[in-house]
């Protein structure tokens, strides 16, 4: 009991610093995105692609080096796409009352076969869906555009949702103004995800239509 109380107290102390960490982390990410975006726009004013390597490859199609780099970036996107969804999967499993790890048998330190099957099956399903999405998108820049809208914007909602959940649990005190800010930011992220995903799918459709008219 004393150990559980101590652990609960430690969790409460960590939760109290959540908003401070949230502000520092999201502020750092926003600054990095702004810096990288401004640098790319400054270096390549005519860029209209979501991928710098794809843009450079289109400008220099004869370059074997750029083609190789573009292929490696495509492979990196394929391998890391499922990892981007892992935090969201853990949150959803927690909301459903499930653990992110295989369940252990009662009175035993070993995991049950059902827990293992569910755990592995979920991860294989996510990886398979991600792989099919990567294969279905015809160009790297369109894939980056789609993943950026669908994954990054949706993942940005989670920290603010966690802050509100901590407030609901009574661990974190959040006033009406900060609650409104969290809700507003969540709505903005959801709007960015919806509009960005729609534009990405529209661009993919237009790209396929153009390739159909001009196969070469």
Image (cartoon, rainbow, N blue to C red):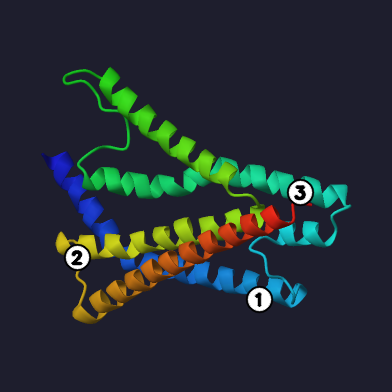
Residue receiving disc 3: 69
Marker disc for residue 167: 2
Q: Marks 1 and 2: in contact by CB < 8 Å?
A: no
Q: Mark 3 or mark 2, which is nearer to you?
A: 3
Element marked by disc 1: helix
Q: Position of residue 109 (x, y in %)?
A: 26, 20
The residue that label 1 is drawn on is 38
Check the image and report above or below for 97 versus 50.
above
The percent position of residue 156, horizontal first and vertical second, equals: 41, 62
Dot 1 crowding, Cα within 10 Å, few <14, some 14–19, many 20+: few
Q: Residues within 10 Å of mark 2 (few under 14, many from 20)?
A: some
What SS does tag 2 mark?
Answer: helix
Of the image marks 2 and 1, the number of the one nearer the N terminus:
1
* For the residues bearing labels 3 and 1, Cβ distance under 8 angstroms: no
Q: Where is residue 1 in the image (x, y as percent from the top left)?
A: 10, 39
Residue lying at the far right in this picture: please name it.
62
* Residue 39 visible within the image: yes
Give the mark, 3 or 2, whose residue is nearer the N terminus: 3
């Amino acid at each position: 009991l004393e150990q559980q109380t101590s652990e609960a107290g430690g969790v409460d102390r960590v939760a109290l610093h959540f908003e401070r960490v949230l502000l520092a982390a999201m502020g750092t990410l926003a600054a990095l995105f702004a810096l990288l975006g401004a640098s790319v726009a400054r270096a390549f004013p005519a860029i209209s692609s979501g991928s710098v390597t794809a843009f450079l490859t289109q400008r220099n199609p004869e370059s074997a080096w750029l083609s190789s780099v573009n292929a490696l970036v495509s492979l990196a996107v394929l391998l890391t796409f499922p990892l981007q969804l892992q935090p969201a999967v853990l949150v959803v499993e927690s909301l459903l009352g499930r653990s992110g790890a295989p369940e252990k048998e009662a009175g035993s330190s070993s995991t049950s076969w059902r827990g293992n099957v569910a755990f592995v099956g979920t991860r294989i399903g996510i990886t398979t869906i991600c792989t099919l999405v990567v294969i279905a998108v015809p160009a790297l820049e369109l894939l980056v555009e789609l993943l950026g809208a669908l994954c990054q914007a949706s993942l940005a909602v989670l920290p603010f949702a966690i802050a509100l959940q901590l407030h609901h649990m009574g661990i974190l005190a959040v006033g009406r103004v900060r609650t409104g800010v969290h809700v507003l930011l969540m709505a903005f992220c959801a709007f960015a995800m919806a509009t960005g995903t729609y534009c990405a799918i529209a661009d993919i459709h237009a790209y396929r239509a153009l390739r159909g008219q001009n196969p070469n």
